Amino acid sequence: MADGEFETFEIDGAELRIPSGQLNDRLRGRLKDQGYEHFERDLARAHLRPGDRVLDCGSGAGLVAIVAARIVGAENVTTVEANPEMHDALRRNLRRNAGEGLRLIKGAVVPDDYAGDSVTLNLRGAFWAASLGETKGKGMRPVEVAAKRFGRLLAKREATVLTMDIEGAEAALLLAPLPASIRLVIVELHPNLYGEDTRDKILASLTAQGFRDLEARRTEEVYAFGRGD
């Protein structure tokens, strides 16, 4: 349903209102046919459990965070979103579908050794195309957003689960060891942005840390890795 300024979609019983200017035809189609974040939602439902504390990096419209909140409780979910043009709509989506306890952090997740308090985010059309990596392209609009250091977020939120869809920026984060407290990682990788060799290094790094691939069959680059049980 559209009211000109916003469009409304219902997925898994969640009502998402998204600014029309943050949509394109492909994203609109994925939202209408329930395909948006389909793999991440399925993996969250399959592998999250009560007692988990979730750090969700790259919230987008908030759907994965909402699904997680239904399983572990809103107070146990923190979601991070860099795109400032989505923050107001995202906050309303989270409140409408998950209550007041779910925490939203505004900014982009960066490595702990990142120098500076802000980082350039490149916006391009639909909200799911915002990226820290690409600097050129038709319609690219750079904006400065707060830099949120990965290790500090994990420690402060006492996370045990990491969900991540940050359009290529995961390569700078997942090649370093994760804290021992992290038992589950659900991530979309983007080898189209950094190459298959880097993708394979990320997978090898997780394996070396004791994670195992929980879903060997896939049609997209969305993974669930677990360890410790």
Image (tube, grey):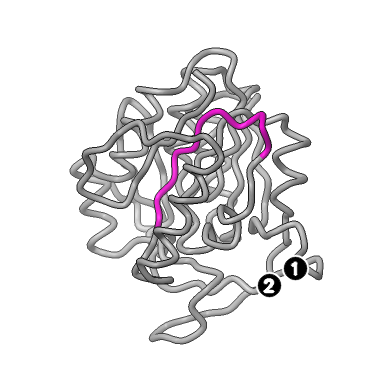
Determine the CA span between mark 2 and mark 1: 6 Å
- Give percent across and percent down for residue 57: 56, 47
Label 1 element class: strand
Circle 1 crowding by C-alpha within 10 Å: few under 14, some 14–19, many from 20: some
Residue ID at (47%, 81%): 140
Q: Is residue 184 magenta?
A: yes
Q: Earlier in the sequence, mark 2 or mark 1?
A: 1
Query: Where's the N terminus, which quadrant?
Result: top left
- Give percent across and percent down for residue 127: 44, 61
- Give percent across and percent down for residue 204: 46, 51
Q: Nearer the viewer, residue 151 or 18?
A: 151
- Give percent across and percent down for residue 88: 58, 49
* Label at residue 144: 2
Residue ID at (59%, 40%): 79
Against 72, residue 223 (above or below) is below
Q: Amino acid at mark 2?
A: Glu
Q: Are marks 2 and 1 in contact (CB under 8 Å)?
A: yes
For the record, the magenta segment spans: 179-189
Circle 2 crowding by C-alpha within 10 Å: few under 14, some 14–19, many from 20: some
Instruction: Name the outermost residue toward the right.
Output: 116
Instruction: Name the outermost residue toward the front.
Output: 208
* Label at residue 40: none
Answer with the quarter of the image where residue 40 lies.
Answer: top left
Answer with the quarter of the image where residue 167 lies.
Answer: bottom left
Q: Amino acid at mark 1?
A: Ser
Q: Nearer the viewer, mark 2 or mark 1?
A: 1
| Residue 148 relative to residue 165: left or right | right
Against 157, residue 139 (above or below) is below
Quickly name the residue at label 1.
Answer: 118
Q: Nearer the viewer, residue 73 or 182?
A: 182
Residue ID at (64%, 74%): 120
